[in-house]
């Protein structure tokens, strides 16, 4: 948030728009990151299968994807205009299969994910991180 505000990029200065970005960042910080991280662990990496945890975090991942899909049915990007909130949430969407989420069932989130993922700058970054 500091860098976005300092550079004047990816964080709108208008109060209402700024708080929409913050709202979606907070969802990522308190929901998407922790929940999807647990889904990754229990569904893909845990040395032993824990059915309760697997089901709990898979359902939570599906719920979060549904929240994003519903919002993206109304707007092009999560807070309305592309921002740091989209960046923070997009990276978690890269591993949706690890979370037990089939993006085909969420057409608006899939459109958003595919669009951002096709950008040349994102493609360059993905190549560097391979």
Image (cartoon, helix red, strand yellow):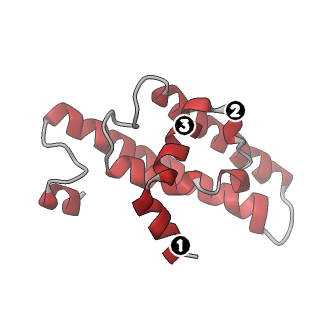
Q: How far apart are marks 3 and 1 (CA)?
A: 21 Å
Q: How far apart are marks 1 and 2 (CA)?
A: 27 Å
| Left or right of residue 99, residue 12 in this image | left
Quarter of the rendering containing residue 60: top right
If the image is split into quadrants, where does the N terminus sit?
Answer: bottom left
x%, y% of residue 130? 58, 76
Q: Position of residue 84 (x, y in %)?
A: 33, 52
What is the number of the mark on residue 14?
Answer: none
Is 112 on the left-hand or right-hand side of 100? left
Q: In which quarter of the image is residue 23?
A: top left
Earlier along the polypeptide chain: callout 1 or callout 2? 2
Image: 107 above or below 119: above
Residue at disc 1, secondary structure: helix
Q: Residue at x 52, y 68 (%)?
A: 126
- Rendered image: mark on residue 105: 2
Badge nearest the viewer, 1 or 2: 1
Residue 105, image quadrant: top right
Residue 29 in sight = no
Residue sitting at 24 percent across and 38 percent down? 19
41 and 91: which one is in front? 91
Q: Is mark 3 on a helix, strand or loop?
A: helix
Where does label 3 land, which residue? 111
Q: Name the mark nearer the viewer: 3 or 2.
A: 3
The residue beneath circle 1 is 127
Can residue 7 be seen in this snapshot? Answer: yes
Task: Give the farthest residue toward the top.
Answer: 74
């Amino acid at each position: 948030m500091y860098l976005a505000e300092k550079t004047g990029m990816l964080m709108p200065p208008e109060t209402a728009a700024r708080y929409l970005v913050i709202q979606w960042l907070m969802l990522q910080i308190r929901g998407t990151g922790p929940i999807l991280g647990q889904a990754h662990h229990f569904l893909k990496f845990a040395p032993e299968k824990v059915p309760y945890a697997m089901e709990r975090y898979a359902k939570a991942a599906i719920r979060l994807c549904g929240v994003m899909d519903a919002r993206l049915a109304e707007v092009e990007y999560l807070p309305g205009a592309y921002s740091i909130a989209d960046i923070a949430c997009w990276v978690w969407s890269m591993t949706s299969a690890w979370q037990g989420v089939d993006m085909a069932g969420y057409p608006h989130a899939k459109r958003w994910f595919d669009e951002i993922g096709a950008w040349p700058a994102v493609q360059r970054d993905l190549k560097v991180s391979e």
